[in-house]
Image (tube, rainbow, N blue to C red):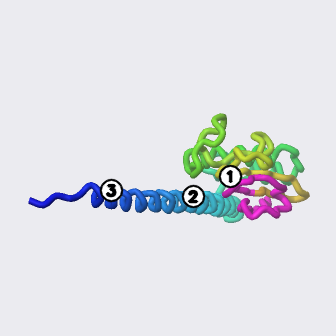
Amino acid sequence: MKAFTLIELLVVVAIIGILAAIGVNTFSGFQEKAKISAAKKNNANICKWVLAESYKCHIGIEDILNGQDTCSSISAGINNGSPTIDDKTVISIIDGLKGKFKNPFGANYSRWGDQAVKQKVIQGGWNNDRDLGYTMLDPKNEVGYFKINVSTCTKLPCNGDTWNNTNDNIAVCLIKWYP
């Protein structure tokens, strides 16, 4: 009966160790890319959903944002120049999306949990690395409409001006909501 020598066993263990180390590094790279991709996809899907909800008003559907608001309420606020219509609508959007999108990076900031959609004005945002993976809604009133900047930090650092975005780590879309 022939057995393996100690040297042969050590060589096999060393080879397995090297392969495991390479595999762990490769896997963590794939994991990071998947999180970035998921954050960008969240941003794109949230943008599409909000835009589709705004279009419902133009085809006569009254209840929108998963029952959180109505077209007539939003239109009246825009037409009257209400200073709170943008915040009210963004809160309705956030409530309508509750439970639909999770932050792929987890709960970076314990106060926010892992719900991905937040309002920038109320809950801070941009200029903090804790914003990684969260999608921030930043509304602004304009004459005859309001606009919503939908921004998601996909990679650190998470800083800059999302209205004049120059940071490649932030995915941004702009939605104009007309009555």
Amino acid type, callout 1: Thr
Disc 3 or disc 2, which is closer to the eye? 3
- Taking the spot 72% from the left edge, 47% from the top edge, the residue there is 129
Amino acid type, callout 3: Leu
Residues 140 and 105: in front is 105
**Which residue bears the numbered disc 1?**
135
How far apart are labels 3 and 2 at the CA level?
33 Å
Residue 27 at x, y = what percent?
A: 48, 59
Report the residue that reaches farthest toward the left. Answer: 1
Quarter that holds the C terminus? bottom right
Up-down relation of residue 158 to residue 60 (above or below):
above
How far apart are labels 2 and 1 at the CA level?
18 Å
Q: Is residue 60 visible?
A: no
At mark 2, the secondary structure is: helix
Disc 1 or disc 3, which is closer to the eye? 3
- The picture quadrant where one finds residue 1 is bottom left
The residue segment tinted magenta is 150-179
